[in-house]
Image: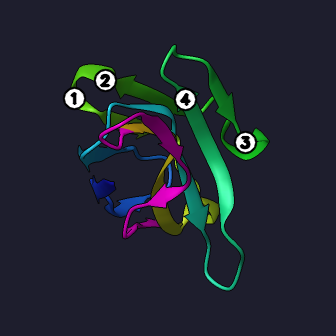
Amino acid sequence: QVQLVESGGGLVQAGGSLRLSCAASGRFFSINTMGWYRQPPGNQRELVATITSTGSTNYADAVKGRFTISRDNAKNTVYLQMNSLKHEDTAVYYCNADRVKYYSGTKFSQAYDFWGQGTQVTVSS
């Protein structure tokens, strides 16, 4: 029901900034939670930040004070502003949509855990 397309990744020097965007499209009524996760080389996927439709945010300790997540509900788009980037921020960043409300023709239902294809962020030291 949901397609997620990320953009904004790339190569940046340590201390620099990048802004990721993720646009959701498809047949749905609303998305409760959108977020960003990352998978560093050789490691498991981990939480970066999430934001609900009402604006409540949650951040991983490693990015607090440096990254800011925001959301435009009218555009079904979530952003991640990344400042003061470090080499250890190098990873594939994935957009996530969770608790998606959709109308099935007879009633509203909820679907969970949709993922984008990922965008590479590389921070050179």
Q: Is residue 121 above or below residue 55?
A: below
Please name the colour scheme applied to the rendered image.
rainbow
Q: Mark 1 or mark 3, which has the lower sequence index?
A: 3
Please provide the residue range marked out in magenta: 103-125
Q: Is residue 91 left or right of residue 2?
A: right
Q: Is residue 39 above or below residue 73?
A: below
Q: From this viewpoint, is residue 100 visible?
A: no
Calculate the distance from the C-alpha at mark 1 to the C-alpha at mark 2: 5 Å
Calculate the distance from the C-alpha at mark 2 to the C-alpha at mark 3: 21 Å
The residue labelled by disc 3 is 60
Identify which amino acid the numbered label 3 is placed on: Ala
The residue labelled by disc 4 is 51
Identify which amino acid the numbered label 4 is placed on: Ile
- Based on the picture, tell me whether residue 105 belongs to the magenta stretch: yes
- Based on the picture, tell me whether residue 46 belongs to the magenta stretch: no
Q: Mark 2 or mark 4, which has the lower sequence index?
A: 4
Calculate the distance from the C-alpha at mark 1 to the C-alpha at mark 3: 25 Å
Q: Mark 3 or mark 4, which has the lower sequence index?
A: 4
Q: Which residue appears at 41% of the width and 47% of the height?
A: 16
Q: Residue furthest bottom?
A: 42
Q: Nearer the viewer's eye, disc 1 or disc 3?
A: 1
The residue labelled by disc 2 is 72
Where residue 43 appears, x then y in whole percent?
A: 71, 78
- Element on which disc 2 rests: strand
**Residue 75's mark?**
1
